[in-house]
Image: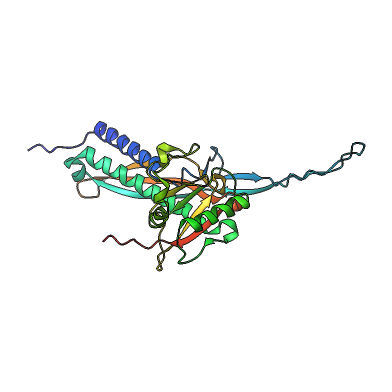
């Protein structure tokens, strides 16, 4: 009896489809990646140096007085180096023989989900250190409209910048929504944000010009408190040296044969400007469903 197998052409096509699926997933299921400043490391470099300048102060000058006011640009620099994350997937010939296209699509979706989740959690881990580590809100505090508007006022008074956004756990967003039901229907996503990438995470809430997004990748602690963020795009950065990479290796020593797929991604999530954001500590207990 003939055994159905996969030709090299089928494998190449299916492998390409898997990578396309993985890239699609990564690009469209990552709210944080679309809300921070992204950089690409130039080929041949392992470190990126990012300059930052301070504010200049203008002094009064008399009409007949020489202008001797020397203004320092106050430049400082920060160095960012990427690191590698990744994993290995083993796909046996038996699995491929059963349903090639479905298997590769499934693997592509899993790779995209896994890579996105890691990148998202790396960015979320940076929230707590913003604003010098001084959080807005407090443990057990309620994410209601009064507290939220006070946070927004703090951000504007302390010059966080424009294009501000909030990223918070869905349970906390739900609590805020209760206070906003009388304000009417959800508002369209503000200009300046990528609707294509963020539509699934945009909550429809805009307060004081600040757009609100949600992600379940923010994990509550044992007391159901979470740390979200209120930030400008330049508060956090994401440096990528190259797109996600994969390499296929044949291994005849596994069963009747298998492909080992090695997947790696080299990047760095980092704090770009500490003073353009702040952590938000609020309660995110699960709501009663009955």
Residue 125, placed above or below residue 52: below
Q: Position of residue 280 (x, y in %)?
A: 50, 58
Q: Quadrant of the C terminus?
A: bottom left
Q: Residue furthest right?
A: 64
Q: Nearer the viewer, residue 273 or 46?
A: 273
Q: Position of residue 189 (x, y in %)?
A: 44, 40
Q: Residue furthest left?
A: 1
Residue 250 is at least partly visible in this image: no
Name the colour scheme: rainbow
Total count of labels: 0
Q: Residue furthest bottom?
A: 223
Residue at image position (40%, 53%) is 177
Q: Nearer the viewer, residue 265 or 150?
A: 150
Residue at image position (60%, 59%) is 132
Q: Is residue 44 left or right of residue 108?
A: right
Residue 118 is at least partly visible in this image: yes
Q: Position of residue 264 (x, y in %)?
A: 41, 46
Q: Is residue 289 left or right of residue 142?
A: left
Q: Nearer the viewer, residue 138 or 28?
A: 138
Residue at image position (18%, 45%) is 94
Q: Is residue 154 left or right of residue 283?
A: right
Q: Quadrant of the N terminus?
A: top left
Q: Position of residue 287 (x, y in %)?
A: 33, 61
Q: Residue furthest front?
A: 182
Q: Nearer the viewer, residue 38 or 229?
A: 229
């Amino acid at each position: 009896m003939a055994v159905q197998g996969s030709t090299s052409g089928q494998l190449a096509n299916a492998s390409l489809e898997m990578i396309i699926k993985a890239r699609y997933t990564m690009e469209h299921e990552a709210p944080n990646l679309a809300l921070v400043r992204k950089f690409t490391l130039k080929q041949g470099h392992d470190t990126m140096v990012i300059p930052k300048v301070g504010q200049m102060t203008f002094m009064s000058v008399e009409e007949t007085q020489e202008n001797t006011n020397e203004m320092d640009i106050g430049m400082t620099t920060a160095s960012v180096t990427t690191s590698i994350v990744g994993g290995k997937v083993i796909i046996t010939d038996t699995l491929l023989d059963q349903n090639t296209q479905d298997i590769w699509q499934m693997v592509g979706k899993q790779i995209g989900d896994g890579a996105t989740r890691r990148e998202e959690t790396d960015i979320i881990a940076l929230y707590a250190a913003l604003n010098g580590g001084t959080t807005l809100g407090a443990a057990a505090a309620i994410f209601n409209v009064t507290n939220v508007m006070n946070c927004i006022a703090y951000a504007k008074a302390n010059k966080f910048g424009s294009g501000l956004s909030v990223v918070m756990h869905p349970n906390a967003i739900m609590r805020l929504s209760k206070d906003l039901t009388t304000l009417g229907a959800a508002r369209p996503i503000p200009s300046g944000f990528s609707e294509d990438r963020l539509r699934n995470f945009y909550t429809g809430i805009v307060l004081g010009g600040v757009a609100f997004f949600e992600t379940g990748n923010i994990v509550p602690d044992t007391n159901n408190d979470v740390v979200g963020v209120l930030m400008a795009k330049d508060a956090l950065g994401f440096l990528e040296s190259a797109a996600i990479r994969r390499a296929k290796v044949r291994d005849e020593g596994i069963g009747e044969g298998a492909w080992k797929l090695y997947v790696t991604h080299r990047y760095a999530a980092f704090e770009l400007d500490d003073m353009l954001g702040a952590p938000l500590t609020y309660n995110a207990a699960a709501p009663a469903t009955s």
